[in-house]
């Protein structure tokens, strides 16, 4: 798993899969979670939307979010993603 520490992300689309985020800040981002292969610790989320695969254990994802600083987070899996109009695998979190 690739480690990303103390980075600030703003107005970005990020795929969490395969990354371990520590001390990062996400503002006005779109975050895609399609597997349980990710970690984050001491991160902050502001005006951020999560797109989570409905087949993932929601408790596992919500527990991780509850341990972070969050404002109004929206978590959902919308038709745009399910219909393939957004391809998060082509987007990377590394800068």
Image: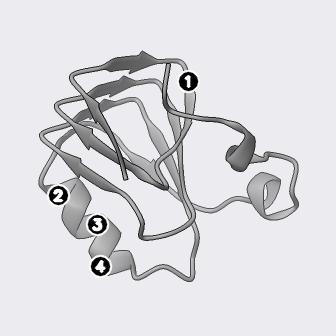
**Front position among marks 1 and 3:** 1
The Cα atoms of the two marked residues, 1 and 3, are separated by 21 Å
Residue that appears at 86% across and 56% down: 84
Residue 76 against residue 73 in the figure, above or below: below
Look at the numbered discs 2 and 1 and tell me whether their residues touch, using CB distance below 8 Å: no
Residue that appears at 49% across and 42% down: 49
Residue highlighted by disc 2: 66
Estimate the x, y position of residue 1 in percent, counting from the top left.
37, 53
Q: Along the line of sight, which residue is nearer the eye, 41 or 75?
A: 41
Residue highlighted by disc 4: 59
The Cα atoms of the two marked residues, 2 and 1, are separated by 22 Å
Look at the numbered discs 3 and 4 and tell me whether their residues touch, using CB distance below 8 Å: yes
Which dot marks residue 57?
none
Look at the numbered discs 1 and 3 and tell me whether their residues touch, using CB distance below 8 Å: no
Is disc 2 placed on a helix, strand or loop?
A: helix
Look at the numbered discs 2 and 4 and tell me whether their residues touch, using CB distance below 8 Å: no
Is disc 3 placed on a helix, strand or loop?
A: helix
Estimate the x, y position of residue 71 in percent, counting from the top left.
26, 36
Which dot marks residue 12?
1
Look at the numbered discs 4 and 1 and tell me whether their residues touch, using CB distance below 8 Å: no
User: Which is more N-terminal, label 1 or label 4?
Assistant: 1
Estimate the x, y position of residue 5 in percent, counting from the top left.
23, 28
Instruction: Decide if residue 53 is on the left or right side of residue 90.
Output: left
Residue highlighted by disc 3: 62
């Amino acid at each position: 798993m690739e480690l990303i520490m103390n980075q600030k992300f703003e107005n970005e689309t990020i795929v969490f899969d395969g990354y371990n985020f520590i001390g990062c800040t996400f503002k006005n981002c779109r975050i895609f979670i399609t597997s349980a292969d990710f970690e984050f610790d001491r991160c902050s989320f502001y005006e951020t939307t999560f797109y989570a695969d409905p087949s993932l254990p929601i408790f596992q994802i919500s527990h991780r979010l509850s341990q972070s600083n969050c404002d109004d987070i929206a978590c959902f899996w919308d038709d745009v993603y399910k219909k393939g109009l957004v391809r998060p695998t082509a987007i990377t979190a590394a800068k």
